[in-house]
Image: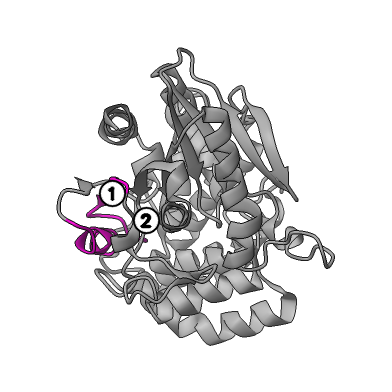
Amino acid sequence: MPFMNQVFLECEHVPLRRRGPRPLSVHLSLAASIWGAAEGGQDNLPSGPPGTGVSNRMLRMLTGIRKYHEHPYVRVPSAQEVVWTQGSARLLYYPAVKASGQAVFLIPSLVNGAAILDLMPRRSLVAWLGAQGISSFLLDWGALAEDAMEKPGQAGAGSFDALFSSRILPALATAHTLARGPVHVLGYCMGGLLAAAAACLAPESVRSLIMVASPWDFHAGDQTLSARVRGWAPGARSMAESLGRLPVDWLQILFASVDPLMAAHKFIRFADLPGDSDEALMFVAVEDWLNGGGDLPAGIARTCIEDWYRDNSTARGAWDVLGKVIDPEDISCPAFVVASAVDRLVPMESSQAFCARRAAGLTTTLALDCGHIGIMAGRRSIPEVWTPIEKWISAH
């Protein structure tokens, strides 16, 4: 396509002060191929100025990407104290403004990391909870893939067993000690699975379990993502075994395949936003988080792809951590499950399958209609997600 020469010439001049959208060449190629095939038809593309064709759309996308790369925003974390470390992992403590005796231990996804839970001023879950009187302990994974390469005798993080024995359970025990009692455990996305396992393995430290946009039955609901993971599993296993890790860019390509034009649409919209607007600042903060993930250790990647997505070990009662099967029936504390009907990455049916295996009255559910990221960092997240979570914590 002749216009692609112009597009990639433009791409060469995009300053690489930021890494997104990752991988840039893949997002550009996806947009070019889909728009090229749809040119002249009804393709549901963003509206544009007169003469909007494939080349013009690509240049508008690049304008948004350049604007993102040049944006001056720099994330400033909320006030915190490091209270525990292992390898590059840290447990960050955010004290409440006024003590209520309640504390929450937060587990983020292994893919994109902890920043989404302390994203920016006025969009920080930990800071907001602190203003409501709830202290937070946030587990920051650090560089898991590098930690997995630690020397023999050191506490690595190359498998889920190692992750729990050397990271999650010791950090949870620290939170329990500092909070002077059991804590609420909240997991976002993949972190919800880890939170459920922590509640199963260390019930004495867990007051309640909160799972936000977290899968459980990987074969329930929309199978767009699951089908791709299963189809790409052999190649992912080979890559992970060869490198000792699964590169984060492989994961980014996987997520991009679910909605190939998402990046194009959002960067075109961003190009038209005033750079100092709240919406633009939020866009940059979220994109920085999305593109800041790290590689997964090979053992953890193998469990996620083969045991979870391919074999559905969680829903089948076959996911084993440290010699114990993680079964919702064995989790004695009350649980709060937050899911969305329009989440493209974690179908509501997948999340709610966790509830079906619990005794009546032990699980409360909250059904929403916002996206996977919007559920935690969207315009409606404070009234529709954070506030119900705060009320749940205060009531338990």
Q: Who's the residue at 35% across and 48% down the image?
A: 212
Residue 158 place in picture, x, y as percent: 67, 67
Q: Who's the residue at 47% across and 53% down the image?
A: 198
| Quadrant location of the N terminus in the rendered image | bottom right
- Mark closer to the chain start, 1 or 2: 2
Is residue 347 on the magenta stretch? yes
Residue 6 place in picture, x, y as percent: 62, 61
Q: Who's the residue at 28% across and 49% down the image?
A: 337
Residue 57 place in picture, x, y as percent: 45, 55
Amino acid of disc 1: Val
The segment highlighted magenta reads: 333-359
Please, is residue 108 above or below residue 226 in the view? Answer: above
Mark 1 lies on residue: 337
Residue sitting nearer the eye, 71 or 10: 71
Residue 283 seen in the figure: no
Q: Farthest residue in the left direction? A: 360
Q: CA distance from mark 1 to mark 2?
A: 8 Å
Residue 196 place in picture, x, y as percent: 40, 55
Is residue 271 on the magenta stretch? no
Please, is residue 256 above or below residue 389 in the view? Answer: below
Residue sitting nearer the eye, 3 or 198: 198
The quadrant in which residue 334 appears is top left
Please, is residue 138 above or below residue 245 in the view? Answer: above
Badge 1: how crowded within 10 Å, few (<14), some, or many (20+)? many
